[in-house]
Image (tube, coloured by chain):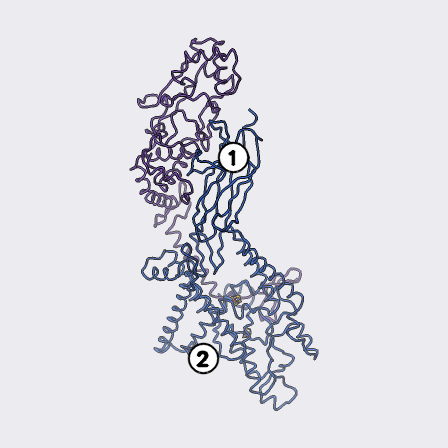
Chain colours: A purple, B blue
Amino acid sequence: MSDTPRFDEPTGTHTVGHEWDGIEELNTPLPRWWLWTFYACIAWAAVYVVLYPAWPMVNSATQGVLGWSSRGDLEKEMAGHTAKRAPIVNAIAAMPIAALPSKPELLEAAIQGGSAAFKVHCVQCHGAGGAGVVGLYPSLTDDDWLWGGDLATIETTLIHGIRNPDHDLTRVNSMPAFGRDGILDSTAINDLVSHVRVISRQEKPSAASARGAALFENNCVACHGTNGEGIRELGAPKLTDPVWLYGGSRDAIAKTIHNPRNGVMPRWNDKLDAVTIRMLAAYVHSLGGGENAPAPVVPAAAEAAAPDKAPANG
Amino acid sequence: MAEADTLAGNDGPLYAARKGVYPKKVDGTFRRLKWLIMGVALAIYYGTPWIRWDRGPYAPDQAVLIDLANRRFYMFQIEIWPHEFYYVAGLLIMAGIGLFLVTSAVGRAWCGYACPQTVWTDLFQHVDRLIDGDRNAQIRLANGPWSAEKVAKRAAKYAIYLAIAFWTGGAWIMYFADAPTLTRDFWTGDAAFVAYGTVAALTATTFVLGGFMREQVCIYMCPWPRIQTAMMDEKSLLVTYKDWRGEPRGSLKKALAHPGSIGDCIDCNQCVAVCPTGIDIREGPQIGCITCALCIDACDTVMAQVGRPRGLIDYCALDDVAVEKAGGTAPPVLKTLLRPRLMIYLAIWSAIGAAMLFSLGERTRLDLSVQHERSPLYVQLSDGMIRNNYTLKLRNMETRPRKVAITVSGLPGAQLWTENGSREKASQRVNMTISPDSVTRVRLFVAAPAQGLARQDFTIATYGRDGDPRGDTDTIQFDRPEAQ
Ligand code: SF4
Ligand code: SF4
């Protein structure tokens, strides 16, 4: 238990004097270059403190003479990316949206850009991936469209919105509140529901549905079409398919006839730039229900849609 | 430092200056082996990136290339993708076990022959001898005044150091890009900043560590001596001074004067003179000894001159030391090398190597992974069918475009199409061409009749349509609305 340094014969070195369970520590001298390395590190630290943000102060740190900041780095990087994207953005802006499919790499870029914008502006109502919420907001992934599902039509809907107040070009229609406004009584509405459920193949024809067919003829065909096939120009939904925005059960249909929702979608032309809207349209179109343009606007579009074509690498 | 020394309570200094090491030129078996290993190691290091290897138009033609930007690692006909990093892990494990094997067999042979620090230090020491002359001339020059000759010699020597260091740093970056292109870009100033930075850093470290730090790296900075010492056992070969034969040492004259009472060591100090770390092996095994065996060569030369048997300093295991001290003869080296411990290491090492080679030969080069899109889980279509969306990743690991088909099974009445197709043309199969050496992301739409389980497993498969029908499958779920 010696506390005093001892000279260690085999190594020719003193011990430091500590000893634990017979284990002693040699006082081997440090190499001198190590000392110089240590001083160099201190010098480096001093230089660093002058050049870079270092000392924490009350509100922020000292700035350093180089003026470097991680936020500045980010800004520079973002500016670089914007510059890199510029040719694509300009090309997308310069062509009519219906021609986009003829340029697969632009379409791909637009879909990617739209996907990002969708997550910021659209998911609040339409849900992630455009799934929609039954009874509130339409699904964008199915093949049933109120106003049309080709690129140009989707873009128009995005630009002007639906039933957007204070905008002349917005898409409007309005289903009368047959029940609330006393146009039909509840028996009549019940009959009408039966008819709608028959044409959507959810019920077998019955006496009630036959009465409902007559009511449909008088009240509904103007918008929903003779056979309930819907009229796109009016934004009137097809009633014969299994896709229901506000539900297809007896209760849900009765509720809609009694007091329709007439949902509102904001217009985006006052919030987003034209290219972002175009990208959003391309993205929504890509979700699975996108339709081809009604008439062949650009012949090349057909070629791009041809199968067996390698998709652009993402 | 006097004050601090007083605090420490003894007379030893707190800091030690480096003692100059001026190893003398030597020739012999081990020196030749070192030359050979040095030549091979440097040739591999400097030359490998320049070997070309034709892989067709879609892949680089550099035999060994670590393509960080595209996340590929090429090594002759092997191409490794990031998800196959376990091969690299396997190589590292092999390197680890290889080190166990070598170290338990021949001790710090890595340090003595193959370590870059050793190889470059050796190279720089040859430069010293080339410019300054052999040991004595070097010592004289180092201690001499700064004459014009000394300045000129130092300038020449450091210039050569710097050239070697720069070449070393420059060779390193060639592994990460096409060597001829990078060389041109480097000299025209078009290479990436990181290339110049890397060359600068490696030039600096080579210059400092190889030119000046040398044995200080081994003694103070490197963890290997400690680790390897722990791996050795009493049968590992060590460079050993056979003191039972050499002691008491004495000059030839003394030996002649007192025959029989003087050992074989004639105290000529040759072993110390040639030692690249400047130690005296006659003090016994020590951390400073990198087992380069140059002292064996030096001593053998001396023994030959004085007509005594070679091997006063020799590779010798601790067990052999005991045997020889007791007057016996050590078992042949081969027997020590074939002991079970080494055989087990060798077996494990070979097994891992063989397993990796086997799996490299067997791996599929067309890979499918499928993700079910969760939002929405299913889509009601207007004709009553249900659609699910999937994201497919088709990994084509071959350096040629592939024609592939995607099919499903286990989902009756299914229709498939991709974002480039349309439902009108949907069928049971999608054909497409995928780009070489890349991952192609495909959104696959699958529609099936509404009747069926709410959650049903089915299989998506992909296979080549271009002669190589091998492929991959993935089982995934199809969702339908709960009973309406
Ligand atoms: S001690 Fe370290 S640096 Fe020196 S030769 Fe051995 S492994 Fe290399
Ligand atoms: S003592 Fe011998 S083996 Fe060890 S480093 Fe010196 S010369 Fe090499």
Q: Residue at x 63, y 84 (%)?
A: B263
Can residue B236 be seen in the rendering of this structure?
Answer: yes
Q: Nearer the viewer, mark 1 or mark 2?
A: 1
Q: Secondary structure at mark 1?
A: loop
Q: Earlier in the sequence, mark 1 or mark 2?
A: 2
Residue B134, numbered circle: 2
Residue B1, numbered circle: none
Place of residue A179 in the rendered image (x, y in percent of width and height, measured from the top left): 45, 11
User: Does residue B138 appear to the left or right of B188 in the view shown?
Assistant: right
Q: Residue at x 58, y 89 (%)?
A: B253
Place of residue B450 in the rendered image (x, y in percent of width and height, measured from the top left): 53, 29
User: Does residue B441 appear to the left or right of A15 in the view shown?
Assistant: left
Q: Which residue is mark 1?
A: B414
Place of residue A223 in the rendered image (x, y in percent of width and height, measured from the top left): 39, 17
| Subunit ID for the residue under disc 1 | B
Place of residue A73 in the rendered image (x, y in percent of width and height, measured from the top left): 37, 46
Q: Total marks drawn?
A: 2
The quarter of the rendered structure image containing the C terminus of chain B is top right
Q: Residues within 10 Å of mark 2 (few under 14, many from 20)?
A: some
> What amino acid is found at the position of numbered circle 1 in the picture?
Ala
Question: Residue B116 versus residue B278: which sits nearer the camera?
Answer: B116
